[in-house]
Structure formats: structure tokens, C-alpha cells
Amino acid sequence: MHQKSKNKLIILIIFLLFAIPVLVAYLLGSGLVDFEPSSTKNHGLFISPPIKVADYTEADWVNELTDHWTLIYRTAEVCDEACLNWENKLHRYNLTLAQNADKLELMVLAEEFNNREEDPYQHITKVTTKGEKVLNDMFNDLSTQSLGSGSGLYVVAPEGYLMMAFTRDNKPEDIIKDLKLLVKRKG
């Protein structure tokens, strides 16, 4: 093969190395090729578009949602024994993160909280949403994507956006896997 032919071949190969990825990206992005991966890494449902919690309340607690991941259990009712069981679940999810546990804050939102003689979960932030109509309406609507009947289990990103909901079908190990992936995202 002559030098001139070799040079043309090298130029063609270099062109194809750059052109093929662009062509594939265009085809996948345009919808001409119907490709969807068979599975994703996440088990929870992405909230689309993400919801900025601060847009629904002016309460001070909303400032605690930034700079870390937050796992929120929300109930539209008074926080009673069932709510205490959820606090236990939140606590256990956090324990499974081991050295990354400090990257996840825990929060319970409820209409009201029953007075307890002892609170075994003092590290869980408890917020009363009584009188927060706009916030409660948003969570009631969002609960259809989560546990239903006004209840839900949600993840808030470090930027303060509700971005993922877990459903009744999510097993604890699925929730733990998602939380482990999320807390690795921001160090």
C-alpha cells in the first residue's frame, strides 16, 4: 500500500471514530431507534419534575433540607404507633449506611405528634404540618406515587428537591440499595 493510501485510510478511521458516537447519540435521542435499557439501578420512582420543598412552605425546617440527603416519612394523620414503627424503619435504613450514615438525615412530617413519655428516636427531625395547606396538598397529591392515602416515603436531594418516592412494592433491601447509591453521589 502506498503512503498516500495509508494516510487516507488513517484519516477515514479517525473520522469514523468521532462520527460514529455522534451518529449513535443522534439516533437514540431522536427517537428513530426505540431503545430502552431492560433495567435501571434505582428501585424507587423518580419524581418528575423534582419538587422544591421550599416553594410550598416558608417554615424554618425547610432550611434543614440542604447540603445532605434527607429521607422523609410523611403521614397526613396524627403520628401514633404506626408512625413510631416508621421511625424505627428510618433509623434502621440509616444504620445500614455505616460510615455514610452522617450523609443522610431523617425526618417525619405529620399533622400532629402524640405526646410520648420517651422518644427513642430523638435524632429524627419531627415536623408538624398542621395549617400548612399548600404543603399538605402537595404531599397528598404526591402520595399516589408512594404509599397512598396521604402517606409517603421520599428522598430529598442536597439541593432541597423531592426527587424520589418509594412505593409499597419496594422491599427494604431495595430502599437501602437506592440510599447507598445516593449518598455516594455527594461526599
Image: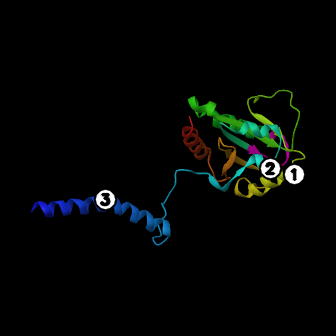
Label 3: few (<14), some or many (≥20) within 10 Å? Answer: few
Of residues 132 and 72, the one drawn nearer to the viewer in this rendering: 132
Range of residues picked out in magenta: 73-81
Q: Quadrant of the N terminus?
A: bottom left
According to the image, label 2 marks what residue?
Answer: 56
The picture places residue 96, in percent across and down from the top left corner, at: 59, 34
The picture places residue 127, in percent across and down from the top left corner, at: 82, 38
Q: Amino acid at mark 1?
A: Lys
Front tag of 3 and 2:
3
According to the image, label 3 marks what residue?
Answer: 17
The disc, 3 or 2, on the residue closer to the chain's N-terminal end is: 3
Q: Measure the alpha-carbon separation of dots 2 and 1.
A: 9 Å
| Element type where label 3 sits in the image | helix
Label 1: few (<14), some or many (≥20) within 10 Å? Answer: few
- Magenta span contains residue 75: yes
Q: Amino acid at mark 2?
A: Tyr
The disc, 3 or 1, on the residue closer to the chain's N-terminal end is: 3
Left or right of residue 25: residue 8: left
| Element type where label 1 sits in the image | helix
- Magenta span contains residue 160: no
Contact, mark 2 vs mark 1 (Cβ under 8 Å): no
Left or right of residue 38: residue 164: right
Front tag of 3 and 1:
3
**Residue reaching furthest right?**
131
| Element type where label 2 sits in the image | loop
Label 2: few (<14), some or many (≥20) within 10 Å? Answer: some
Of residues 13 and 182, the one drawn nearer to the viewer in this rendering: 13
The circle on residue 133 is 1
Q: Measure the alpha-carbon separation of dots 3 and 2.
A: 49 Å
Q: Measure the alpha-carbon separation of dots 3 and 1.
A: 56 Å
